[in-house]
Amino acid sequence: MKFRVQVAVLLKKSVLDPQGAAVERALKSHGYEGIKAVRVGKLIELEVEDESRCEVKTKVTAWADQLLANPVLETFDVIVEPQL
Amino acid sequence: MKFRVQVAVLLKKSVLDPQGAAVERALKSHGYEGIKAVRVGKLIELEVEDESRCEVKTKVTAWADQLLANPVLETFDVIVEPQL
């Protein structure tokens, strides 16, 4: 079965995010009010073929931990959906 | 009311994504099989204070179109959730 997987990688809340701060300043300088806590991260989307959703989640979480995210500075979320 | 908003920006399917191809090669060289169509994009997370979810969605979609994504090369999705 095919699954569509998204891995969202963001800097930890305790780590300074200069890119997020720059985006926040840019939005505010365009007159967009009422925003705060802007963080910029990476989104990795992939197609995985495997037996079950659970299996895919376990595998991709291991890959993310080893290769896609830096666990010292970043946190990640893995979202698995069946491919339509 | 406070909302937590995620803007996911990915290159259009028709645009070559060398970063995605590099991640795919890296995963495969580590022995991870059964993956394809890896794409790497940006994830922008922000907190917005406004009256309704619908209002926030409209505003952030406009910001994304003007500032956060390049509509020539990229597509984006806006996800709005109430802040707990």
Image (spheres, coloured by chain):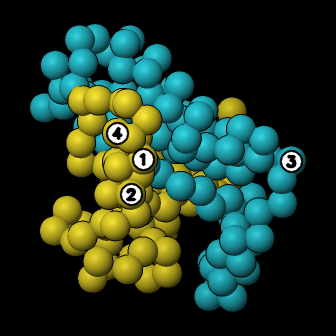
Chain colours: A yellow, B cyan
Q: Mark 2 points at which residue?
A: A22
Crowding at mark 4 (Cα within 10 Å: few <14, some 14-19, many 20+): some
Q: Mark 4 lies on which chain?
A: A
Q: Name the residue under label 3.
A: B14
Three-letter amino acid code of the residue under disc 3: Ser
Q: Residue furthest bottom?
A: B29
- Residue B81: x and y in percent read 30, 28
Horizontal relation, residue B54 to residue A45: left or right: left
- Residue B48: x and y in percent read 27, 31
Horizontal relation, residue A50 to residue B43: left or right: right
Where disc 4 sits, the SS reads: helix
Badge nearest the viewer, 3 or 2: 2
Q: In this orientation, which residue lies closer to the viewer: A78 or A72?
A: A72
Contact flag, marks 4 and 2 (Cβ < 8 Å): no
**Badge 4 or badge 2: first in the primary sequence:** 2
Gap in Å between the C-alphas at discs 1 and 3? Answer: 29 Å
Q: Mark 4 points at which residue?
A: A28
Q: In this orientation, which residue lies closer to the viewer: B62 or A29?
A: A29
Contact flag, marks 3 and 4 (Cβ < 8 Å): no
Where disc 1 sits, the SS reads: helix
Contact flag, marks 2 and 1 (Cβ < 8 Å): yes
Where disc 3 sits, the SS reads: loop
